[in-house]
Image (cartoon, rainbow, N blue to C red):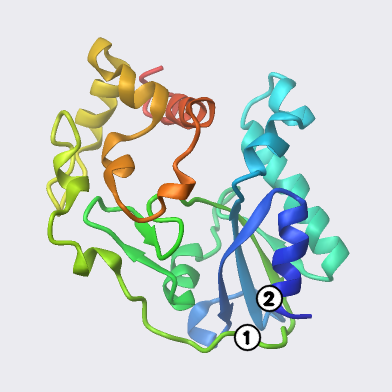
Amino acid sequence: MTPAEVETAARGAGLTSLGVVAARPEHKAPEGVGAVVLLGMAREGWAAFTAAPEYADGAADPLDRWSVRVVEGLGESLGAQALFPFGGPPYQPFMRWAAASGRMGPSPLGMSIHDEHGLWMSFRGALGFAALDALPEARPFARPCDTCASMPCLRACPVDAFDGETYHVDRCAAHVAGREGAACRERGCLARRACWVGQDFVPEPPRAAFHMAAFLRARGSA
């Protein structure tokens, strides 16, 4: 099986490959895993999720529960181990794998930036294979921020929650939860939206609002 074949199967389930890693000992993959395919939501994935029973059943963590069902289903059909960035401890080393993929790295906002999805990426899971054919060559990440002179992401936040070194999360959460934070709360983080990378993946308002509501709940601000 090749990464391209995994991507085809993932897209059919509303997911997409964010990167592929040929697992070495330092990557700390589970025993027997020689290749890891990192999975995020595809552009059509929001429609798949909102049509799923998890979205409407009123129970906690609908997106994580949907992700578990879908990624485990892919694992069963493709002969791979389903892996998740949540559900620990212990936690799988997703950020170690992300760095090893050569497709993402740190941004001035403190979150990871992807070479195609920009700041609009999150891991829904991963598939661990004993082996994959036609693995991409390992390469260092070409960080788009290093060629961005204007850094619009650092200027777009209404409350200066990002200064290039620190993310002032409490300041951000207070703004998003307040009257003046409607634009962030309903359309997604303005700093992330300002980045020129990944503009095709900026979430539609219902999806942005869903994630912002989850952020506020996690911060105890909802």
- Point 73% across, 80% down: residue: 2
Q: What is the x, y in percent for residue 149?
A: 13, 61
Relative to 197, is 187 above or below?
above
Q: Which residue is mark 2?
A: 3
Q: Is 134 left or right of 202, judged from the image as shown? A: right
Q: In the rendered image, is residue 120 in sight?
A: no
Which of the image's four quarters has the C terminus?
A: top left
Q: Nearer the viewer, residue 158 or 93?
A: 158
Q: What is the x, y in percent for residue 188?
A: 38, 32
Relative to 57, is 80 above or below?
below
Q: Which residue is mark 1?
A: 135
Q: Considering the numbered disc 1 on the image, is that residue within a helix, a strand or a loop?
A: loop
Q: Nearer the viewer, residue 82 or 6?
A: 6
Q: In the rendered image, is residue 167 in sight?
A: yes
Q: Considering the numbered disc 2 on the image, is that residue within a helix, a strand or a loop?
A: helix
Relative to 24, is 8 above or below?
above
Residue lying at the far top of the rendered structure? 179
Specify which label sits upstream in the sequence, 1 or 2. 2
For the residue marked with disc 1, what is the amino acid? Leu
Disc ID at residue 119: none
For the residue marked with disc 2, what is the amino acid? Pro
- Point 55% across, 58% down: residue: 90
Q: CA distance from mark 1 to mark 2?
A: 7 Å
Relative to 166, is 24 above or below?
below
Q: What is the x, y in percent for residue 133?
A: 72, 87
Callout 1 touching callout 2 (CB < 8 Å): yes
Q: What is the x, y in percent for residue 36?
A: 62, 73
Q: Is 3 left or right of 199, judged from the image as shown? A: right
